[in-house]
Image (cartoon, rainbow, N blue to C red):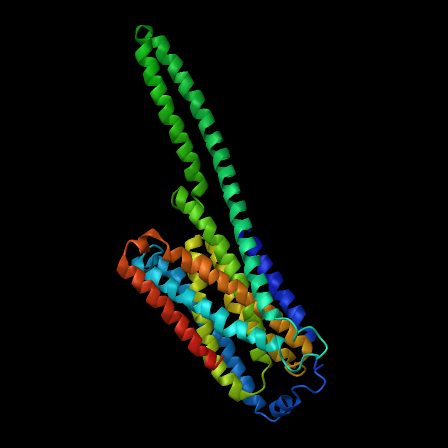
Amino acid sequence: MRPPCAALVLAAVAALLLLLLAPAARADDGGCGADGAAAARGGDLARARALKIAAFFSILVCGALGCCLPVLGRRVPALRADGDVFFLVKAFAAGVILSTGFIHILPDAFEKLTSECLPAGGPWKDFPFAGFGAMVGAIGTLVVDTVATGYFTRLHFKDRDAAAAVSAAPVGDDVEKKQQQATAAAPHARGSDDHEGHVHMHTHATHGHAHGSTALVAAVGGGEGDKEHALRHRVIAQVLELGIVVHSVIIGISLGASKDPSTIKPLVVALSFHQMFEGMGLGGCIVQAKFKLRSIVTMVLFFCLTTPVGILVGIGISSVYNEDSPTALVVEGILNSVAAGILVYMALVDLLAEDFMNPKVQSRGKLQLGINVSMLVGAGLMSMLAKWA
């Protein structure tokens, strides 16, 4: 999945989510949640609208700040991708993402898919659909992760071999011509010259192969190992953003459709920190993926704008939206459960496990202790936010 294609896929997913949530805007609850709706009508709608506007800009700025910090940190030696500070920041962000999946999204999915407002004759109370959705999300992420990584790896080696063959071909012809000239000039020293020609040809052939590999990895920088490492993190960054987008659209619409100022006010602060911490995790993956500038800007903008755009959509449908309608409960519950599975998998497998098993971390006890503490602090702080969001 190349970066422009990934942006199109993410945009399509966001549009699909909006289409799925559009029918849920109809107040088809049959009376369920009517008291809450009446209370909302008696609330201060003007104050609620002002808080939503503040939430739009606050979440936008905090999301951009969190996502851009690791990206801009490439110019700061202490924040480089292989530095100790970067390991600590990434562990903190991974703890935040893990807590988001377990504490924020998954319980909400269980609550919606077991709500009393769902039809009594339906299957929703007879089977744990929230847990099933989380499992499907995690397995689906594993499949996408392995298939995309395998595809990039095969494509990488195929292009590398082709580039090496093209670079080595003219070098071989040139060496053969020089060898013939040397043989004609000094026939009495054929044995010595043959040996020298062989060594010379071997050296140039090796140089041609290295030159082909260097040209191939120029797009991401570094050596052969860096190329494979960057390809792996490109997959991670794109799948992680996909999981975040699913959740961001839902919370944005929910916040925008809310009419109670006492509910919106704590959400503004909590979701601002929520977006900033998630942005730090995504930004760290973007840095390690070594995207080009245009791709970095595209991914950062998409992350920053998803929740604010969801807020605008929620404001637009707030007059007819009822979060307790069966359609809204089922759609949001399923999407939240799948998003939880994606984020939990990404946090444990692609973020924490990779860094915790890094040889640099394993060989240094203080750094190992530091990233454990950083991860726990991130997970703890994000869990505390569940009281308000």
Depth check: 311 or 157 in front? 157
Q: Report whether 253 appears left or right of 292.
A: right
Indicate the position of residue 337 as horizontal and vertical percent values.
57, 69
The residue depicted at 34 percent of the width and 54 percent of the height is 82
Depth check: 170 or 257 in front? 257
- In this view, the residue farthest toward the bottom is 42
Depth check: 158 or 172 in front? 158
The residue depicted at 52 percent of the width and 53 percent of the height is 145
The residue depicted at 59 percent of the width and 58 percent of the height is 9
- In this view, the residue farthest toward the top is 188
Q: Report whether 15 appears left or right of 279.
A: right
Q: Residue 18: which quarter of the image?
A: bottom right
Residue 349 against residue 211 in the figure, above or below = below
The residue depicted at 45 percent of the width and 40 percent of the height is 216
Could you tell me how many numbered marks the image carries? Answer: 0
Q: Can you see residue 311? A: no
Residue 299 against residue 388 in the figure, above or below = above
Indicate the position of residue 4 as horizontal and vertical percent values.
55, 54
Indicate the position of residue 346 as horizontal and vertical percent values.
48, 60
